[in-house]
Each structure stands twice: as structure tokens, then as C-alpha cells.
Amino acid sequence: MSNFGVGVVEFLANSRFGPGPMVRNSLVTAQAARADSLWVPDHLNSLFPRAIMKKPYVGAAVLMPRPDACLEPWTMLGNIAAKNRLRRLKLGLAVTDTARRNPAVTAQAAATLHLLTKGRAILGIGTGEREGNEPYGVDWSKPVGRFIEAMATIRALWDSDGAPVTRDSEFYPLHNATFDLPPYKGTWPEIWIASHGPRMLRATGRYGDGWFPGAIFHRPDYKACLDVVRTAASDSGREPASVRAANFLYVVTGRTRDDVDEAIDSVTMKSFGLLIPAAEWKRHGLRHPMGDDFAGFQDIIPQVLDEQTVLSYNSAVPTSLLRSCLLAGTPDEVVDQVAEWRDFGLEYGVFANASFMQPSAKKALAASAPFLQILRKARKL
């Protein structure tokens, strides 16, 4: 049996038919692929600019006319748990953050899901992004320090056995705080950490059960960062291999290579390039249109970008950059790319089908079949 893990991401956008159909489709896809897990993101709005998430740029916009209508993830995970009976997939958050949500509330939500799923919950967590915090008045300063204290708080509550906890903290001090939810058969949810910088990588080695970055696109960088994580685990007295090496992988596929090429060259797919950090652009000899220090996913506030600005920025995005950062191609080509990631240490791929972000609704829907093939073949790596 393969040791390579496979997860599926559902974007949690409300559809014109309500909150359920898209989630049910992803659940069925994950079950049909015999995947290991189903994941949902935690966003108040989309990371892609709403100004272009519409026809004629996105054919599937007819199904999702309000691109920023993001569903609340813990509520949806509870709903999915009730339907997750066929293969009992693990359910994960990809990922929540430690600024918008108090860590005691996150600890409670994750422990509740763990009990509901009989030990199949995964808490994906990180510092979060600017777009989900700053516009809503959430303090975005010292995100790494805040994250490290949140991790210590969650672990302290889970390990308290119901006894009152008091601990000093710059961000989350506890004063006789009681946490009395029990673990499921002695286990708490696995914690998978989205980390990229040195301090976050070391925190992953100390606190994490899995490493789950979303913005590392260069395979040698992935291997180097994984070494930092596992060294930190060893330094903390943990078994280095106990930290599962995962990654969030966007897939663009189709029935033919021409369909894939057409999707990659579309306006909305090029907007993915804005989410790629400036450092990755520089590796390709390019300058990010939003600045030399722009951090991509973490920095963008897409709702303030109008259509002409996005189109102007997108004109600077070469398809070569997208092809290096996405998994793009027919099923066999994509699986070969996954195998390359595996050779640099990847043990668990969490796949998002980004093929719907193209002008043709027909081709977007047709990409579901090759995406399912990719999931099935990846399990055999």
C-alpha cells in the first residue's frame, strides 16, 4: 500500500443553489478517488480579485455569482461530518489563523470536530493573511509571535485534563482557564502548520504533526525548509519523521493539452500569479507588479483592485511562471509533477482543482474527470 497521502480541497464558495451542492460534489470526488482527507479553507472572502471573477473571464461564474461569499468553515465541517459515512475521510482546515480566532475557541472547535468524526479531525493553522484580518480591524502586527503563543495556548488547554490553567502571554494570557472537553480515545486533532519563514518553520518542528505550506513553489526550497522543520523537531526532543511533509497544490488540468494551455493563458488564471510572492518572481528574473517585497498570498487585499488594475497586473504574468508554480497538464503529466515533489520530500498532497477558473464553463466542468484521475493515480505514488 502506498504511503503517499492524498487530500482534496473544497473552496467553500456559496453557489446560486445554496451552500450545499459544491461541498457535496467535493465530498463525492474525494470518496470516489479513495482520498484520505477533505479540506476546507478559512476565509471571509476570496483571495482572487472579485473584479475579474465574473463572465466573460470565468465561465463558472454562473454557478458562483458572488465570489466573496465564503462559507464559515467550522459550521461546514460539522455539516460534512454528518455526511462523511462512506469512507470516513479525515476532515481538515486549510487553514485557520491565530489573529481572527482566539486560540481557546480554535482548541474547542477542533476538539469538538475530533469527537464528531471519531478521531478524524486535522487542525490546519498558520499566521493567516492580511485580507482576512486588517480590513476587519484585527491587529496584524507580530503575526509570528502571536502564532507561537497561540500554539502554546492550544497545547496547554488540551494537556490540562480539565484543571484550571494560568499562564502569562503577551497575546493570550490565561487566568484559571478551564478546558474540559476530552480527547478522542486519548488523541487530540493533528496540528498541521502552514509555515514558510525561519521562525515559523522552527515552531512547526516544535508544535506540529504536519508541515503544510501553501506558498512554497520551488522544490529545492521545499526540501531545505523541510530539513529546518525536522531539525527543530529533533531539537525539541521529538522524532523528526513524526512531522508529516504535506503541501497545498493547485491543479489545472483538462481533457487535452490544448484545453490546459487555454486555461493557463486565461485572465483569471494569470491572477494566480499575483498570489505568488515577489521572491519567486525574482527567481524567474521578473519583478512582481505589486512590489519587490510583496508577499503574494499573505499581502494581497484583492477587493480593492479594480478590473483595469487587475488586467494591467495580469499582463505582466508569464505563463512560464504559472507552469512552474501550478501542477498543470493532462493527468499523467500532473502525476509526474507530483512525483517530482515526492522526490524532494513531499509525503502528502492536498489538491485543489483550479481548472474552474477559465472562460469556458463547459471545459471547467469537463476538467472534473481528469482531476479525479490525478487523485487516483497520485495515491499509487
Image (tube, rainbow, N blue to C red):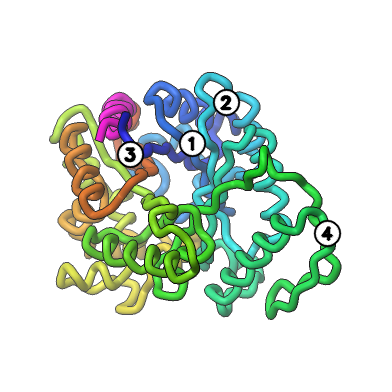
Asked if the stretch drawn in magenta spans residue 359, the answer is: no
Q: Nearer the viewer, residue 47 or 223?
A: 223
Q: Are marks 3 and 2 in contact (CB under 8 Å)?
A: no
Point out the frontmost of discs 3 and 2: 3
SS category of the residue bearing label 3: loop
- 10 Å crowding of disc 3: few (<14), some (14-19), many (20+): some
Q: Which residue is mark 4?
A: 163
Alpha carbon distance from label 1 to label 2 = 10 Å
Residue 84, which numbered label?
Answer: 2
Identify the residue position indicated by label 3 in the image. 4
Label 4 and label 2: CA atoms lie apart by 33 Å
The image position of residue 195, as x and y in percent, is: 44, 64
The stretch of residues the image draws in magenta is 366-381
Q: Is residue 274 above or below residue 95?
A: below
Label 4 to label 3, Cα distance in Å?
Answer: 39 Å
Question: Gap in Å between the C-alphas at discs 3 and 2?
Answer: 22 Å
- How far is disc 4 from disc 1 in space, using C-alphas? 33 Å
Residue 8 to residue 42: above or below: above
